[in-house]
């Protein structure tokens, strides 16, 4: 996301802080020429118009839909599939990753140690329509059964599921699980659509910067031939925030840095997605109060955010019994 923000910052000449909490909802175009986007400030609730001669649609799993509503169907942009990994309340089997497969052949799973627990993956199925990151109960049951077939004495149980990490991955065609191996780039203007609209989709995080730089180069060639794209800075090292321990005091400045740099809008973003605070006992009320203060929440808003977060944590119990 940070790399895409850098791309959008250059292309639309916008302040990155203004983009952290803004969702584009509609392309603005006149006479088949891009003029910007209409957007929604998800924090303040305001409707904004951001004007630019170039718009880069880099919305990941939503890129195909945004291309369709802004121009026409562009199926090569992003065809989704559902993938997931499962963390179990079970000690890791080894200090190393293990690859296992049923004796009869089929799905290969990797069993990886993570904070002393067992992380297993990756499950993979064609995506439902409309695409969702919710993993069906039957798919988790099937995954547990297959892993138990690989290691009969393991005897994993559904009750040991601690967390499900899921997301959408691009595949070569709808309904398959054969992953796309090349990034996609679509110049809408050169294909009868709005001039100045580009849609892109990558295939893996490690290639994201290369995709962003290639996109900027092509955009410059089309719209700013006298100007060269500035190379993006090296990808930052992995954040240490992911290693935070439940109950560990968090400095207010650290929370503010996360909010400013990692698009933290809700308390659940911080606890469930930007850190690993969820992985054990939840932060104490005192810690939550400090977090709310650092995020600028009033007491009423903090309680609302706490209920929202607990509701997300209850999703697994509700869906999987």
Image (spheres, rainbow, N blue to C red):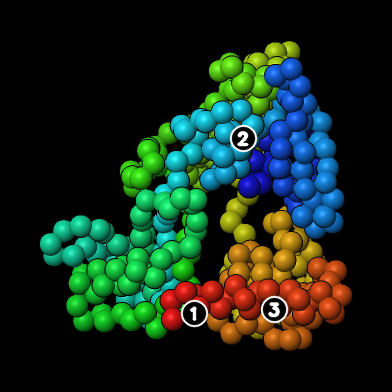
Residue position marked by numbered label 1 in the rendering = 317
Specify which label sits upstream in the sequence, 3 or 1.
3
Label 3 with label 2: CB-CB less than 8 Å: no
Above or below 232: residue 163 = below
In the shown orientation, is residue 233 left or right of residue 64?
right
Q: Where is residue 24 shown, x and y percent of the image? A: 71, 42
Q: Where is residue 73 shown, x and y percent of the image? A: 52, 31
In the shown orientation, is residue 32 left or right of residue 297?
left
Residue at 73% x, 13% y is: 226
Q: Where is residue 129 shown, x and y percent of the image? A: 46, 50
The dot on residue 307 is: 3
Helix, strand or loop at mark 2:
helix
In the shown orientation, is residue 269 left or right of residue 145?
right
Label 3 with label 1: CB-CB less than 8 Å: no
Nearest the viewer among 292 and 116 is 292
Specify which label sits upstream in the sequence, 2 or 1.
2
Residue at 75% x, 30% y is: 28
Q: Quadrant of residue 192?
A: top right
Q: Is residue 182 visible?
A: yes
Q: Where is residue 19 shown, x and y percent of the image? A: 76, 46
Quarter holding the C terminus is bottom left
Q: Is residue 117 visible?
A: no
> Label 3: few (<14), some or many (≥20) within 10 Å?
some
Quote the CA–CA distance across marks 3 and 1.
Answer: 16 Å
């Amino acid at each position: 996301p940070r790399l895409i923000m850098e791309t959008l910052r250059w292309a639309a000449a916008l302040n990155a802080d203004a983009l952290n909490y803004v969702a584009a909802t509609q392309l603005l175009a006149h006479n088949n020429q891009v003029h910007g986007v209409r957007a929604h400030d998800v924090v303040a609730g305001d409707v904004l118009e951001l004007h630019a001669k170039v718009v880069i649609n880099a919305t990941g799993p939503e890129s195909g839909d945004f291309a369709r509503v802004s121009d026409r169907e562009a199926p090569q942009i992003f065809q989704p599939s559902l993938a997931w990994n499962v963390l179990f309340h079970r000690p890791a089997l080894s200090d190393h990753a293990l690859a296992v497969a049923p004796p009869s052949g089929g799905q290969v799973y990797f069993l990886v140690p993570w904070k002393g627990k067992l992380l297993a993956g990756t499950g993979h199925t064609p995506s439902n329509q409309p695409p969702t990151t919710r993993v069906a109960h039957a798919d988790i049951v099937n995954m547990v059964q297959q892993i138990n077939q690989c290691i009969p004495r393991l005897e994993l149980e559904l009750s040991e599921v601690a967390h499900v990490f899921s997301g959408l991955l691009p595949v070569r065609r709808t309904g398959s699980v054969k992953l796309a191996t090349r990034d996609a780039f679509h110049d809408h203007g050169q294909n009868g659509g709005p001039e100045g609209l580009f849609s892109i989709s990558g295939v893996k995080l490690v290639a994201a910067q290369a995709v962003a730089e290639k996109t900027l180069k092509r955009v410059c060639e089309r719209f700013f031939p006298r100007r060269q794209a500035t190379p993006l800075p090296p990808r930052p090292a992995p954040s240490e925030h992911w290693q935070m321990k439940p109950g560990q005091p968090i400095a207010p400045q650290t929370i503010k840095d996360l909010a400013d740099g990692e698009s933290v809008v809700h308390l659940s973003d911080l606890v469930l997605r930007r850190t690993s605070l969820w992985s054990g006992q939840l932060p104490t009320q005192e810690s939550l109060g400090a977090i709310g203060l650092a995020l600028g929440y009033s007491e009423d808003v903090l309680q609302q955010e706490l209920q929202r977060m607990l509701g997300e944590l209850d999703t697994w119990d509700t869906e999987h019994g």
